[in-house]
Image (tube, grey):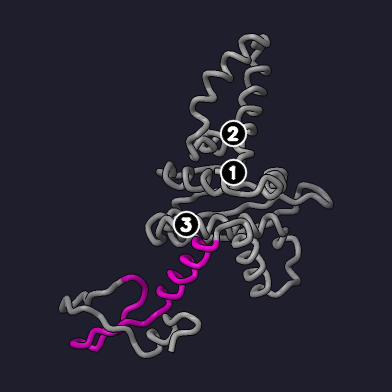
């Protein structure tokens, strides 16, 4: 959790108390009591649920905590820019949904765009916690860089820029873990007994129970740069 999180939360809490009509003495006493809880890196969770434009479907408590954890590890400048963007973050239980940033320009008027960042529920099932952090940081980097507002740029360039920015924010391990898991999902695995091919996370044959073997192509793609 970055140093800016605690004073930011205190200011948000102060604003709520003032709007609720508390006097100065009551505000300061409430802040003193509340400050005891500000050391938890998940303290941004309530803020995410109430003030960060997030719409959560299904059982999203775990995702919300990871999202808040990523926000709390952003540099203050990055957090402020992302927070001020017209973006909404949706966690959807819909099957088959993809992680994607949508840009909506109508009927909001010329020069005004709302972005919708969709996170499918399958992320909690298919990604490790570290890769989930990398996914969130990567998508926040897209929002920061306004990539969805410049569709003329090559997709691979935008993806690399988002990765590099997330890494510069301190999420190298998350990004690298995410890419390894994505590569592994693309590999082909073969049952040495049944000769049946499998993809994704399945590692045992569904027919005979034999442990699967990576194809030569899969073994090659799983090597990291510099491997013999």
Q: Mark 3 points at which residue?
A: 132
Asked which quadrant contains residue 141, the reply is bottom right
Q: Which residue is drawn at 61% across and 35% down?
A: 51
217 over 101 or under it: above or below = below
Quadrant of the drawing holding the C terminus: bottom left
Q: Nearer the viewer, residue 215 or 152?
A: 215
Crowd rating for badge 3 (residues with CA inside 10 Å; few <14, some 14–19, many 20+): many
Q: Nearer the viewer, residue 152 or 46?
A: 46
Question: Could you tell me how far apart the alpha carbons at marks 3 and 1 are, in whole angstroms?
Answer: 19 Å
Q: Which residue is drawn at 57% across and 42% down?
A: 54
The part of the chain drawn in magenta is 172-201
Q: Mark 1 points at which residue?
A: 2
Q: Which residue is drawn at 36% across and 90% down?
A: 216
Asked which quadrant contains residue 221, the reply is bottom left
Determine the secondary structure under disc 1: loop
Q: Mark 2 points at which residue?
A: 6
Asked if the residue under mark 1 is in contact with the one under mark 3, i.e. CB atoms within 8 Å, the reply is no
Judged left or right of residue 125, residue 53 is right
Asked which quadrant contains residue 16, the reply is top right
175 over 49 or under it: above or below = below
Could you tell me residue 31's position as x and y percent? Answer: 58, 20
Could you tell me residue 197's position as x and y percent? Answer: 30, 83
Crowd rating for badge 2 (residues with CA inside 10 Å; few <14, some 14–19, many 20+): many
Question: Could you tell me how far apart the alpha carbons at marks 2 and 1 are, in whole angstroms?
Answer: 8 Å
Determine the secondary structure under disc 3: helix
């Amino acid at each position: 959790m970055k140093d800016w999180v605690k004073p930011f939360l205190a200011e948000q809490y102060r604003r709520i108390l003032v709007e609720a009509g508390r006097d100065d003495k009551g505000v300061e006493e409430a802040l003193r009591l509340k400050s005891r809880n500000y050391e938890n890196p998940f303290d941004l969770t309530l803020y995410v649920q109430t003030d960060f434009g997030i719409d959560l479907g299904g059982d999203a408590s775990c995702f919300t905590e990871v999202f808040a954890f990523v926000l709390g590890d952003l540099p203050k400048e990055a957090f402020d820019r992302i927070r001020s963007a017209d973006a909404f973050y949706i966690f959807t239980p819909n099957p088959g949904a993809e992680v994607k940033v949508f840009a909506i320009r109508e009927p909001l008027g010329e020069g005004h765009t709302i972005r919708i960042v969709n996170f499918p529920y399958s992320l909690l099932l298919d990604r490790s916690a570290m890769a989930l952090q990398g996914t969130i940081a990567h998508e926040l980097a897209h929002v920061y860089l306004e990539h969805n507002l410049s569709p003329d740029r090559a997709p691979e360039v935008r993806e690399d820029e988002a990765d590099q920015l997330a890494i510069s924010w301190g999420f190298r391990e998350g990004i690298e873990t995410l890419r390894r898991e994505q590569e592994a999902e693309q590999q082909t695995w073969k049952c040495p007994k049944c000769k049946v091919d499998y993809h994704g996370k399945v590692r045992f044959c569904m027919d005979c129970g034999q442990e699967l073997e990576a194809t030569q192509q899969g073994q090659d793609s799983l090597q990291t740069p510099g491997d013999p």
